[in-house]
Image: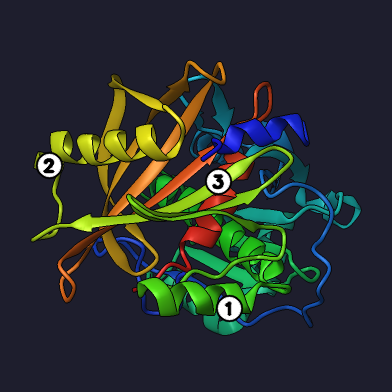
Amino acid sequence: MKHFAESLARAYYPVMGRTLCSCLLPVVLLLSGCIETDIPPAGSYSEVLIVTEDGVRDPFAKALTPYLAQTLDYFVSSDIQFRPQYARAVDVEEVPYVKNILFCGVANSVSDVGRKISSLLGAPGLERVRSGQANVFRKDNLPGPGQVTMIVTAATDEQLHEAIAERGQNIADALEESCRERLRKYLLKDRKKKLSQSLQQKYGFRIEVPSFYRLLSEEESPPGIELLRDGPPRSLGIFWVEWQRPPTLDDRDALFSIRSEYVYERYDGDEMDRSRTRYSIDRLGENYSVRMEGYWSNSKSLAGGYFKTYFLFDETERLMWVVDLLVYAPGLEKHPHFRELHAIAETFSY
């Protein structure tokens, strides 16, 4: 089977009461702002407009930015998760049309940002802030379809600094999750339902397939399938092996061998570098998984790059499902393409 990179030659919320972390307050999902449309707003999901009292000079903006603009290591290159832009609350009506907007400031009636936050939250939201029940809120489709407005606030300056310090990473994670939700909704407006049904009938798993993707390969030995989107090539592979228990981080060597043997045979000689591999506990959709990230290379196609793989245990069938994500995009940002693959991979079920 030809490796997916060879196609380069052809195209070169959490809701109220649910917490992101059990020890932290929830991100509160407020009512949507307007009616949705099929057309996403302009701009990149990697852009976020931070609205504060003093714009880029605001101390709350400075405290929040490192969590949003953190560096993501893709082994061959590094990406910035979100590229912040800044605006003063008094100028917010004149801001560009971006997908992600984040208001950050103390909820009061004195400052421009405080008055805007108070207006967005309304009396019930303000009461939650003053009582210490919530610091982070999310409004979908506000100010327009496909946009998300997040609000990070508190009753005092000191409490807001504490909230950012305690919840900064969770805020970034919630915004990333929202980006995947909106991207997935857009991608699946037009999907290949018959292909999804066929794969479920044959193999017992389900994955939603956007119309932009095609079935590149389907093999019985070793068993697995590969979905591909061109320009740049991005691949979502699914394969499976017999396994007897949920995987843990102690299974690093076994998991490395499972993927290494599979990709060498199926991807026409792909190889992995054990020294450039890392593991973590994660979830894919609603399923517990071990996540592997690493570097692949292929001496035949003279290509290489970053991969991300999820290992999930099927207790009923005693199988290990493996969901494999790859992008070949030399010189381009990797994160937007892996965000797309992750959004699709989260539809995987068995």
Left or right: where does residue 327 sit relative to residue 148? left
Within the image, what quadrant is residue 131 found in?
bottom left
Disc marking residue 30: 1
Find the distance from the CA under tag 3 to the CA under tag 2. Answer: 25 Å
What is the three-letter code of the residue carrying label 3?
Answer: Ser
- Tell which tag, 1 or 3, sits nearer the viewer: 3
Residue 249 higher or lower than 225, as above or below: above
Left or right: where does residue 178 sit relative to residue 17? right
Q: Secondary structure at mark 2?
A: helix
Q: Secondary structure at mark 1?
A: strand
Residue 307 higher or lower than 350, as above or below: above
Disc marking residue 251: 2
Q: Position of residue 174 (x, y in %)?
A: 49, 58
Find the distance from the CA under tag 1 to the CA under tag 2. Answer: 41 Å
What is the three-letter code of the residue carrying label 1?
Answer: Leu
Disc marking residue 235: 3
Left or right: where does residue 247 sit relative to residue 168? left
Residue at x 58%, y 78% (from the top left corner): 30
Disc nearer the start of the sequence (1/3): 1
Residue 235 higher or lower than 175, as above or below: above
Frontmost residue, 129 versus 333: 333
Q: Quadrant of the C terminus?
A: bottom left
Find the distance from the CA under tag 1 to the CA under tag 3. Answer: 35 Å
Residue at x 42%, y 69% (from the top left corner): 134
Residue 187 higher or lower than 100, as above or below: below
- Tell which tag, 3 or 2, sits nearer the viewer: 3
Q: Secondary structure at mark 3?
A: strand
- Tell which tag, 1 or 2, sits nearer the viewer: 2
